[in-house]
Amino acid sequence: MNNTFVTLAALAAVMLAAGPLFAAAGNPPPDAPGIRVGGPCTYADHPGTATILAVVPAKPDKDVPTPPYPGLTVTYAFAPVGPMPPQGSRLAGKVQTMTLVNGWPPGPRFLEKYGIRPGAALPCVLRVIQSGTCTPLLFEFPGVDLADYFEIEK
């Protein structure tokens, strides 16, 4: 029994040590051309500007847990810098809603930290899927970390 425990412990240690190597082998760095998101998908990036249209208190959504801070609904319109493919061009000028990665609305301190207010023009990239079955269209905001959950800390 003692040899079995030692063998299992050694195997677990090897697996834990080697895990990051296997994970990194199939994932390009985030800034690699043709980055893959959530599977074997590639995207074409289309830079532009997101103009913040409004910031209002968020209404509770039965499908999204309520954040532990007062959520704010942030709406914006995307204006591309250059030509867009058909699937992306239909979004130009349409009202979009900014959410954090987990679907929560951002809070007041998040907006302050990233300079988000009505009338602000933020750099924005519309990512249009080229291959695969991932999310077909994604908006990214360089300089705004939509996974920054510092507002939940006490």
Image: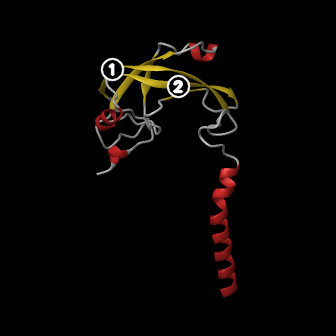
Q: Secondary structure at mark 2?
A: strand
Q: Residue at x 66, y 75 (%)?
A: 10
Q: Distance from label 1 to label 2 (Cα)?
A: 20 Å
- The quarter of the picture where residue 72 lies is top left
C-beta proximity under 8 Å, tags 1 and 2: no
Q: Residue 55 location, x and y as percent?
A: 31, 24
| Mark 1 residue type | Ala
Res. 1 in view: no
- Tell me if 90 is positioned left or right of 143 in this view: right
Between 101 and 118, the one nearer to me in the picture: 118
Please, is residue 34 above or below residue 93 in the view?
below
Q: Residue 127 location, x and y as percent?
A: 58, 26
Indicate which disc residue 119 carries: none
Q: Residue at x 64, y 37 (%)?
A: 32
Between 25 and 5, the one nearer to me in the picture: 25
- Tell me if 42 is positioned left or right of 117 in this view: right
Count the marks.
2
Indicate how the structure is coloured in the image: secondary structure
Question: Mark 1 highlights which residue?
Answer: 54
Precedes in sequence: disc 1 or disc 2: 1
| Mark 2 residue type | Val
Question: Mark 2 highlights which residue?
Answer: 125
- The quarter of the picture where residue 62 lies is top left
